[in-house]
Amino acid sequence: MNKVKIYLFATLRDYAGAKTLEMEIPAGMTVAGLKARLVNAYPKLAPVQEAMIAAINREYAADEQILPLDAEIAFFPPVSGG
């Protein structure tokens, strides 16, 4: 198992009720897999799951990227504006 630290920003923090989380995940899990696990644990994240932006160790990451050991993962809400 791989332990990761997860940071949630802006509305994601409100939906989950926490700004940081620690989670044990299996080796080889992708960003998309972690998003699904977060939604399972925090159902209020479901409406924004597909639009959540991820960063691994302070670099933006795609959904298919595999999470490294002891990573710090940040999730940001979708951005809108004009």
Image: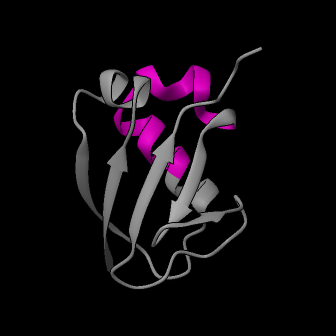
Front position in the image: 7 or 63: 7
Q: Is residue 7 above or below residue 58?
A: above
- Residue 24 at what x, y percent from top left? 29, 68
Q: Could you say which quadrant of the image residue 33 lies in?
A: bottom right
- Residue 9 at what x, y percent from top left? 39, 37
31 sits to left or right of 14: right
Residue 34 within the segment the image draws in magenta:
no
Quadrant of the rendering where the C terminus is positioned = top right
Q: Is residue 78 above or below residue 4?
A: above
- Residue 60 at what x, y percent from top left? 62, 62
Q: Is residue 32 above or below residue 56?
A: above
Front position in the image: 46 or 81: 81
- Residue 5 at what x, y percent from top left? 29, 63
**Overall secondary structure of the magenta section:** helix
Residue 37 within the segment the image draws in magenta:
yes
40 sits to left or right of 59: left
Task: Identify the image's colour scheme: rainbow, by chain, secondary structure or one colour.
Answer: one colour
Seen at 40% across and 28% down, the residue is 10
Seen at 42% across and 23% down, the residue is 11
Seen at 35% across and 37% down, the residue is 41
Number of marks drawn = 0
80 sits to left or right of 2: right
Q: Is residue 43 above or below residue 50?
A: above
Quadrant of the rendering where the N terminus is positioned = bottom left
Residue furthest top as drawn: 82
Seen at 45% across and 73% down, the residue is 57
What segment is highlighted magenta in the picture?
Answer: 35-50
Residue furthest front as drawn: 82
